[in-house]
Amino acid sequence: REPTRAATCAEARTNGPTCSREKNAFPIGEQPRYHGAMDLGGVPAHRLDARFGALLGEPELADLEQERWPAYGMWLDSSLAYLNPAYARQMPPLWGLGARVLDATGVLRPAVERVHGTVCTTKEPAVMRYACPTASREREFELRVFPVGLATGEVRALLAIHSLVVDRPHTDGHAPDDATYRDRTGLVRQCAHCRRTRRNGEPEIWDVVPAYIDRAPANTSHGICAPCAAHYYGAMPLE
């Protein structure tokens, strides 16, 4: 397992009004929109730290104001410095300017820290996909993180965009069954990431059980399935 380095971002220091998104490709799902114009002063103060706005630059900010997916800017300690309208519509005031993104990532925190650290060290965009299913639908999101402030060749802040890339009904759902999923100690084991449930016995098999996604049964123990362990904590590919 490659160690995460949240401190990597905190070590980066720079100045300059440049945001690098040249490698922003969205091969799956709908292409985000980047067009339109807006005066920098048109973004209300409760959504934009003026220092971040100056660093990002007016053209980039205008594009992000029209982006359909939630996007946010953050300082290198992950505290929020900009929220686009799509983000502001979805998130409660608690997660406004100054709140730390990493505090909201839960079990994904080590993987998100790794993405942030990779962007800071490589000075290139990075991408991570993650599962967030519901009882009826299979859903995957894509997190793209971009370096902000490369005028002097370093990174001063980060820009992140979350987009939904998979949204379809479950095709491999299984019915809840204690004989299949409850072990000898009475526990049901569910992956904390993808929310699949492990069958009893070997080999290790994890199933989508919609009823357990909707409401975890009594005596559920949360762990990490092998695919999620490899994806989030092992050799996770970053584009």
Image (spheres, rainbow, N blue to C red):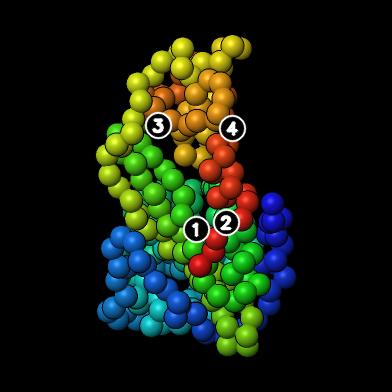
Task: Give the x, y percent position of residue 47.
Answer: 43, 64
Which of marks 3 and 2 precedes in the sequence?
3
Which of marks 4 and 1 precedes in the sequence?
1
The reply to whether the C-beta atoms of the residues labelled 1 and 4 are less than 8 Å apart is no
Disc 3 residue crowd, few under 14, some 14–19, many 20+, Cα 10 Å? many
The reply to whether the C-beta atoms of the residues labelled 3 and 4 are less than 8 Å apart is no
User: What residue is at 34 percent from the left and 70 percent from the top?
Assistant: 65
Measured in 3D between alpha carbons, the distance from the residue under mark 3 to the one under mark 4, in whole angstroms, is 15 Å
Measured in 3D between alpha carbons, the distance from the residue under mark 4 to the one under mark 2, in whole angstroms, is 18 Å
Measured in 3D between alpha carbons, the distance from the residue under mark 1 to the one under mark 4, in whole angstroms, is 20 Å
Which of marks 2 and 4 precedes in the sequence?
4
User: What residue is at 43 percent from the left and 63 percent from the top?
Assistant: 161
Measured in 3D between alpha carbons, the distance from the residue under mark 2 to the one under mark 1, in whole angstroms, is 8 Å
Which of marks 4 and 3 precedes in the sequence?
3
Labelled disc at residue 128: 1
Labelled disc at residue 208: 3
Closer to us: 75 or 115: 115
Query: Outermost residue, bottom direction?
Result: 152
Which of marks 1 and 2 precedes in the sequence?
1
Closer to us: 48 or 128: 128
The reply to whether the C-beta atoms of the residues labelled 2 and 1 are less than 8 Å apart is yes
Task: Give the x, y percent position of residue 88.
Answer: 38, 57
Closer to us: 212 or 94: 212
Measured in 3D between alpha carbons, the distance from the residue under mark 1 to the one under mark 3, in whole angstroms, is 22 Å
Labelled disc at residue 223: 4
Which of marks 3 and 1 precedes in the sequence?
1
What's the amino acid at mark 3? Val
When asked about the image quadrant of residue 135, the answer is top left
What's the amino acid at mark 1? Met
Q: Nearer the viewer, mark 3 or mark 4?
A: 3
Q: In the displayed structure, would residue 6 be above or below residue 208?
A: below
Labelled disc at residue 236: 2
